[in-house]
Amino acid sequence: MADFTPPFIDKYKNNPVGSPRDPKGVEKKDDEEWFRRKAEWLYSLWLTDYAYVPFSNANEYTNLRRYAHGRQSTLKYMDILDPKEPTTGERSGFYNISWDIVPVFPKYRDRIRGALSRFDFTTSVQALDDNSEMDRTFMKFMSYVQEKEKEWEMQINAAMGIQPVEEIPDQSMMTKPRSLQEMEMFESMGAYRLPLEASFEKLLFKSAKLSEWDEIKLRLEEDAIDIGLFVTQDYTDPISHVPMVRYVDPAFWICAATRDNAYTEIADCAEVRFLTLAQCKDYGMTDDQIHEAANLYQGLYMNPSWNTVYRNGQWDWQQMALSRMPSSAGKSST
Protein backbone atom coordinates (compact mmCIF):
# COMPACT_ATOMS: atom_id res chain seq x y z
CA MET A 1 0.00 0.00 0.00
CA ALA A 2 1.39 3.40 -0.93
CA ASP A 3 1.22 6.33 1.46
CA PHE A 4 -2.41 7.34 1.69
CA THR A 5 -3.63 10.94 1.61
CA PRO A 6 -7.18 11.03 3.02
CA PRO A 7 -9.77 13.31 1.42
CA PHE A 8 -11.08 16.39 3.25
CA ILE A 9 -8.25 16.21 5.76
CA ASP A 10 -8.25 19.98 6.40
CA LYS A 11 -11.99 20.05 7.00
CA TYR A 12 -12.21 17.23 9.55
CA LYS A 13 -8.78 17.52 11.19
CA ASN A 14 -8.78 21.26 11.80
CA ASN A 15 -12.47 21.34 12.72
CA PRO A 16 -13.25 18.25 14.83
CA VAL A 17 -16.86 16.98 14.71
CA GLY A 18 -18.74 15.86 17.82
CA SER A 19 -20.83 12.72 18.14
CA PRO A 20 -24.52 13.29 17.28
CA ARG A 21 -27.26 12.69 19.82
CA ASP A 22 -29.69 9.88 19.25
CA PRO A 23 -32.76 11.00 17.28
CA LYS A 24 -36.05 11.39 19.13
CA GLY A 25 -39.32 10.18 17.69
CA VAL A 26 -37.62 8.79 14.56
CA GLU A 27 -36.39 5.30 13.83
CA LYS A 28 -32.60 5.51 13.74
CA LYS A 29 -32.41 3.31 10.64
CA ASP A 30 -34.45 5.90 8.73
CA ASP A 31 -32.45 8.93 9.88
CA GLU A 32 -29.89 9.54 7.10
CA GLU A 33 -28.66 12.75 8.72
CA TRP A 34 -27.78 10.92 11.94
CA PHE A 35 -25.75 8.29 10.08
CA ARG A 36 -23.92 10.96 8.09
CA ARG A 37 -22.98 12.90 11.23
CA LYS A 38 -21.92 9.67 12.96
CA ALA A 39 -19.61 8.84 10.06
CA GLU A 40 -18.18 12.38 10.12
CA TRP A 41 -17.53 12.11 13.86
CA LEU A 42 -15.65 8.81 13.49
CA TYR A 43 -13.68 10.13 10.52
CA SER A 44 -12.75 13.23 12.53
CA LEU A 45 -11.60 11.05 15.46
CA TRP A 46 -9.36 9.10 13.10
CA LEU A 47 -7.74 12.16 11.53
CA THR A 48 -7.18 13.90 14.88
CA ASP A 49 -5.51 10.74 16.32
CA TYR A 50 -8.20 10.12 18.94
CA ALA A 51 -9.22 6.73 17.51
CA TYR A 52 -7.84 3.40 18.77
CA VAL A 53 -5.73 3.13 15.60
CA PRO A 54 -5.01 6.76 14.65
CA PHE A 55 -4.40 7.94 11.10
CA SER A 56 -0.78 8.69 11.96
CA ASN A 57 -0.26 4.91 12.21
CA ALA A 58 -1.60 4.25 8.70
CA ASN A 59 1.62 5.12 6.88
CA GLU A 60 3.62 3.40 9.63
CA TYR A 61 1.75 0.19 8.82
CA THR A 62 2.79 0.69 5.19
CA ASN A 63 6.42 0.89 6.28
CA LEU A 64 6.13 -2.24 8.45
CA ARG A 65 4.69 -4.15 5.51
CA ARG A 66 7.64 -3.09 3.36
CA TYR A 67 9.99 -4.48 6.01
CA ALA A 68 7.97 -7.73 6.11
CA HIS A 69 8.50 -8.18 2.36
CA GLY A 70 12.15 -7.03 2.43
CA ARG A 71 11.39 -3.96 0.30
CA GLN A 72 12.06 -1.18 2.79
CA SER A 73 13.83 1.99 1.75
CA THR A 74 17.63 1.95 2.04
CA LEU A 75 17.86 5.68 2.79
CA LYS A 76 17.68 5.04 6.54
CA TYR A 77 20.86 2.94 6.43
CA MET A 78 22.58 5.25 3.96
CA ASP A 79 21.95 8.28 6.17
CA ILE A 80 23.61 6.47 9.11
CA LEU A 81 26.61 4.96 7.32
CA ASP A 82 27.15 7.54 4.59
CA PRO A 83 25.33 10.79 5.42
CA LYS A 84 24.97 13.54 2.85
CA GLU A 85 27.36 16.48 2.89
CA PRO A 86 25.56 19.50 4.40
CA THR A 87 26.86 21.84 1.70
CA THR A 88 26.66 19.74 -1.47
CA GLY A 89 23.93 17.29 -0.50
CA GLU A 90 26.01 14.41 -1.91
CA ARG A 91 27.33 11.27 -0.29
CA SER A 92 31.09 11.11 -0.15
CA GLY A 93 32.01 7.45 0.30
CA PHE A 94 31.09 3.76 0.46
CA TYR A 95 30.59 3.62 -3.30
CA ASN A 96 31.95 0.07 -3.34
CA ILE A 97 29.12 -1.15 -1.05
CA SER A 98 25.89 -2.56 -2.42
CA TRP A 99 22.86 -1.07 -0.70
CA ASP A 100 20.55 -3.83 -1.91
CA ILE A 101 18.33 -5.29 0.80
CA VAL A 102 19.16 -8.81 1.93
CA PRO A 103 15.65 -10.11 2.81
CA VAL A 104 15.93 -12.15 6.03
CA PHE A 105 12.62 -11.59 7.80
CA PRO A 106 10.42 -12.85 4.90
CA LYS A 107 11.83 -16.36 5.45
CA TYR A 108 10.82 -16.31 9.14
CA ARG A 109 7.48 -14.79 8.12
CA ASP A 110 6.75 -17.71 5.81
CA ARG A 111 7.57 -20.20 8.58
CA ILE A 112 5.25 -18.43 11.02
CA ARG A 113 2.49 -18.21 8.45
CA GLY A 114 2.88 -21.92 7.71
CA ALA A 115 2.37 -22.68 11.41
CA LEU A 116 -0.70 -20.43 11.62
CA SER A 117 -2.26 -22.01 8.54
CA ARG A 118 -2.85 -25.21 10.52
CA PHE A 119 -5.39 -23.43 12.70
CA ASP A 120 -8.84 -22.44 11.53
CA PHE A 121 -12.04 -21.16 13.08
CA THR A 122 -14.78 -23.43 14.43
CA THR A 123 -18.44 -22.50 14.50
CA SER A 124 -20.77 -23.53 17.28
CA VAL A 125 -24.36 -22.28 17.50
CA GLN A 126 -26.37 -22.54 20.71
CA ALA A 127 -29.97 -21.38 20.87
CA LEU A 128 -30.68 -19.58 24.15
CA ASP A 129 -34.45 -19.11 23.99
CA ASP A 130 -36.69 -20.94 26.47
CA ASN A 131 -38.24 -23.32 23.93
CA SER A 132 -34.84 -24.45 22.69
CA GLU A 133 -33.64 -25.01 26.23
CA MET A 134 -36.69 -27.18 26.90
CA ASP A 135 -36.15 -29.18 23.70
CA ARG A 136 -32.50 -29.73 24.57
CA THR A 137 -33.36 -30.86 28.11
CA PHE A 138 -35.99 -33.26 26.75
CA MET A 139 -33.46 -34.70 24.28
CA LYS A 140 -30.89 -35.22 27.06
CA PHE A 141 -33.14 -37.02 29.49
CA MET A 142 -34.88 -39.03 26.79
CA SER A 143 -31.54 -40.48 25.64
CA TYR A 144 -30.66 -41.23 29.27
CA VAL A 145 -33.97 -42.93 30.04
CA GLN A 146 -33.87 -44.99 26.83
CA GLU A 147 -30.43 -46.33 27.68
CA LYS A 148 -31.23 -46.82 31.38
CA GLU A 149 -34.45 -48.75 30.75
CA LYS A 150 -33.31 -50.54 27.62
CA GLU A 151 -33.47 -54.06 29.10
CA TRP A 152 -36.84 -53.43 30.80
CA GLU A 153 -38.29 -52.15 27.51
CA MET A 154 -37.07 -55.27 25.67
CA GLN A 155 -38.70 -57.53 28.29
CA ILE A 156 -42.04 -55.70 28.04
CA ASN A 157 -41.98 -55.91 24.25
CA ALA A 158 -41.18 -59.65 24.36
CA ALA A 159 -43.99 -60.32 26.88
CA MET A 160 -46.49 -58.47 24.69
CA GLY A 161 -45.21 -60.08 21.50
CA ILE A 162 -44.16 -56.78 19.98
CA GLN A 163 -41.32 -56.95 17.48
CA PRO A 164 -39.13 -53.91 18.22
CA VAL A 165 -38.29 -51.68 15.29
CA GLU A 166 -34.58 -51.77 14.58
CA GLU A 167 -33.14 -48.37 15.41
CA ILE A 168 -30.94 -46.86 12.74
CA PRO A 169 -27.85 -45.43 14.47
CA ASP A 170 -27.29 -41.71 14.03
CA GLN A 171 -23.62 -41.20 13.16
CA SER A 172 -23.76 -37.61 14.44
CA MET A 173 -24.89 -38.70 17.93
CA MET A 174 -22.62 -40.04 20.65
CA THR A 175 -23.27 -43.21 22.63
CA LYS A 176 -26.30 -42.80 24.86
CA PRO A 177 -25.36 -41.97 28.46
CA ARG A 178 -25.55 -44.65 31.14
CA SER A 179 -25.40 -42.20 34.04
CA LEU A 180 -26.19 -38.59 34.80
CA GLN A 181 -22.47 -37.84 34.90
CA GLU A 182 -22.04 -39.20 31.37
CA MET A 183 -25.06 -37.19 30.24
CA GLU A 184 -23.50 -33.96 31.53
CA MET A 185 -20.16 -34.88 29.97
CA PHE A 186 -21.79 -35.55 26.58
CA GLU A 187 -23.61 -32.22 26.79
CA SER A 188 -20.34 -30.37 27.40
CA MET A 189 -18.96 -32.06 24.26
CA GLY A 190 -21.85 -30.76 22.15
CA ALA A 191 -23.75 -34.05 21.82
CA TYR A 192 -27.26 -32.64 22.12
CA ARG A 193 -27.57 -30.25 19.21
CA LEU A 194 -30.97 -29.15 18.01
CA PRO A 195 -31.75 -29.36 14.28
CA LEU A 196 -32.12 -25.56 14.23
CA GLU A 197 -28.61 -25.11 15.64
CA ALA A 198 -27.14 -27.52 13.10
CA SER A 199 -28.90 -25.65 10.29
CA PHE A 200 -27.47 -22.31 11.43
CA GLU A 201 -23.97 -23.79 11.56
CA LYS A 202 -24.35 -24.96 7.96
CA LEU A 203 -25.47 -21.46 6.97
CA LEU A 204 -22.42 -19.91 8.66
CA PHE A 205 -20.07 -22.31 6.88
CA LYS A 206 -21.83 -21.51 3.60
CA SER A 207 -21.44 -17.78 4.28
CA ALA A 208 -17.71 -18.26 4.97
CA LYS A 209 -17.33 -20.15 1.70
CA LEU A 210 -19.12 -17.43 -0.28
CA SER A 211 -16.89 -14.84 1.39
CA GLU A 212 -13.77 -16.76 0.28
CA TRP A 213 -12.66 -17.23 3.87
CA ASP A 214 -9.42 -18.99 2.91
CA GLU A 215 -8.22 -15.81 1.17
CA ILE A 216 -9.35 -13.63 4.08
CA LYS A 217 -7.60 -15.90 6.60
CA LEU A 218 -4.35 -15.63 4.65
CA ARG A 219 -4.44 -11.83 4.83
CA LEU A 220 -5.30 -11.95 8.55
CA GLU A 221 -2.29 -14.16 9.22
CA GLU A 222 -0.05 -11.73 7.33
CA ASP A 223 -1.41 -8.74 9.27
CA ALA A 224 -0.95 -10.57 12.59
CA ILE A 225 2.72 -11.12 11.76
CA ASP A 226 3.47 -7.80 10.06
CA ILE A 227 1.67 -5.30 12.30
CA GLY A 228 0.19 -7.30 15.19
CA LEU A 229 -3.43 -6.43 14.41
CA PHE A 230 -6.11 -7.86 12.12
CA VAL A 231 -9.73 -6.91 11.53
CA THR A 232 -12.76 -8.39 9.76
CA GLN A 233 -16.29 -7.07 9.25
CA ASP A 234 -19.51 -9.04 9.02
CA TYR A 235 -22.14 -7.46 6.78
CA THR A 236 -25.12 -8.17 4.55
CA ASP A 237 -24.44 -7.84 0.86
CA PRO A 238 -26.73 -5.05 -0.43
CA ILE A 239 -27.21 -6.77 -3.78
CA SER A 240 -27.68 -10.46 -2.92
CA HIS A 241 -28.79 -9.84 0.73
CA VAL A 242 -26.52 -12.69 1.81
CA PRO A 243 -24.70 -12.41 5.19
CA MET A 244 -20.98 -12.36 4.51
CA VAL A 245 -17.63 -11.33 5.99
CA ARG A 246 -14.86 -9.24 4.48
CA TYR A 247 -11.27 -8.32 5.23
CA VAL A 248 -10.60 -4.88 6.69
CA ASP A 249 -7.22 -3.21 6.32
CA PRO A 250 -6.19 -2.15 9.87
CA ALA A 251 -4.61 0.99 8.38
CA PHE A 252 -8.12 2.10 7.34
CA TRP A 253 -9.98 0.79 10.40
CA ILE A 254 -11.58 3.41 12.67
CA CYS A 255 -12.61 2.53 16.21
CA ALA A 256 -13.75 4.97 18.86
CA ALA A 257 -11.62 4.68 21.99
CA THR A 258 -13.14 2.89 24.97
CA ARG A 259 -12.19 2.19 28.57
CA ASP A 260 -12.14 -1.55 27.84
CA ASN A 261 -8.46 -2.22 27.19
CA ALA A 262 -9.25 -5.57 25.59
CA TYR A 263 -11.83 -3.98 23.26
CA THR A 264 -14.17 -6.93 23.71
CA GLU A 265 -17.19 -4.65 23.29
CA ILE A 266 -16.87 -2.05 20.52
CA ALA A 267 -19.69 0.46 20.39
CA ASP A 268 -18.73 2.60 17.37
CA CYS A 269 -16.43 1.63 14.53
CA ALA A 270 -16.03 2.27 10.82
CA GLU A 271 -13.61 1.74 7.94
CA VAL A 272 -12.43 3.68 4.94
CA ARG A 273 -13.28 1.57 1.89
CA PHE A 274 -12.39 2.17 -1.74
CA LEU A 275 -15.48 1.64 -3.89
CA THR A 276 -15.63 1.93 -7.65
CA LEU A 277 -18.24 4.22 -9.16
CA ALA A 278 -20.00 1.12 -10.49
CA GLN A 279 -20.25 -0.25 -6.94
CA CYS A 280 -21.53 3.10 -5.69
CA LYS A 281 -24.35 2.90 -8.21
CA ASP A 282 -25.19 -0.61 -7.03
CA TYR A 283 -25.22 0.69 -3.45
CA GLY A 284 -27.95 3.19 -4.35
CA MET A 285 -26.11 6.44 -5.12
CA THR A 286 -27.98 8.72 -7.51
CA ASP A 287 -26.58 9.85 -10.85
CA ASP A 288 -26.07 13.36 -9.47
CA GLN A 289 -24.02 12.01 -6.55
CA ILE A 290 -21.92 9.84 -8.89
CA HIS A 291 -21.40 12.87 -11.17
CA GLU A 292 -20.09 14.83 -8.18
CA ALA A 293 -17.83 11.97 -7.02
CA ALA A 294 -16.40 11.37 -10.51
CA ASN A 295 -15.56 15.07 -10.82
CA LEU A 296 -14.13 15.28 -7.30
CA TYR A 297 -11.83 12.25 -7.54
CA GLN A 298 -10.69 12.43 -11.14
CA GLY A 299 -6.92 12.09 -11.30
CA LEU A 300 -6.73 10.85 -7.69
CA TYR A 301 -5.94 7.23 -6.76
CA MET A 302 -5.02 6.60 -10.43
CA ASN A 303 -8.59 7.38 -11.55
CA PRO A 304 -9.39 8.21 -15.18
CA SER A 305 -10.54 11.70 -16.14
CA TRP A 306 -14.19 12.79 -16.00
CA ASN A 307 -14.51 12.97 -19.78
CA THR A 308 -13.49 9.31 -19.98
CA VAL A 309 -15.99 8.10 -17.39
CA TYR A 310 -18.97 10.09 -18.72
CA ARG A 311 -19.14 10.87 -22.41
CA ASN A 312 -21.80 11.34 -25.05
CA GLY A 313 -24.41 11.69 -22.32
CA GLN A 314 -23.93 8.26 -20.81
CA TRP A 315 -21.72 6.34 -18.40
CA ASP A 316 -18.83 4.20 -19.58
CA TRP A 317 -19.18 1.21 -17.25
CA GLN A 318 -15.72 -0.10 -18.00
CA GLN A 319 -14.17 3.20 -16.91
CA MET A 320 -16.52 3.40 -13.91
CA ALA A 321 -15.12 0.07 -12.73
CA LEU A 322 -11.64 1.67 -12.77
CA SER A 323 -12.65 4.81 -10.86
CA ARG A 324 -12.26 4.49 -7.10
CA MET A 325 -13.39 6.72 -4.28
CA PRO A 326 -12.84 6.36 -0.52
CA SER A 327 -16.01 5.99 1.49
CA SER A 328 -16.83 5.41 5.13
CA ALA A 329 -18.67 2.29 6.25
CA GLY A 330 -19.30 1.30 9.82
CA LYS A 331 -21.71 0.33 12.52
CA SER A 332 -22.89 1.69 15.83
CA SER A 333 -24.59 0.05 18.78
CA THR A 334 -25.58 3.29 20.48
Image (spheres, rainbow, N blue to C red):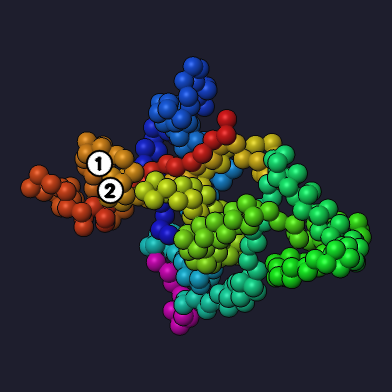
Name above or below for residue 314 compared with residue 14. Answer: below
The residue tagged 2 is: 277
Highlighted magenta segment, given as a residue range: 90-98
Name above or below for residue 334 compared with residue 119. Answer: above
Q: Are marks 1 and 2 in contact (CB under 8 Å)?
A: yes
**Residue 28 horizontal/vertical position (percent):** 48, 27
Q: Residues within 10 Å of mark 2 (few under 14, many from 20)?
A: many
Q: Quadrant of residue 161?
A: bottom right
Left of 261 or right of it: where is 189? right
Residue 38 image label: none
Residue sitting at x 22%, y 39%: 287
Say whether residue 278 is visible.
Answer: yes
Report the amino acid beneath label 1: Ile
The residue tagged 1 is: 290
Judge whether residue 296 is colored magenta. Answer: no
In terms of depth relative to the viewer, which is nearer, 268 or 227?
A: 268
- Magenta-highlighted stretch: main secondary structure? loop
Judge whether residue 94 is colored magenta. Answer: yes
Residue sitting at x 45%, y 51%: 242
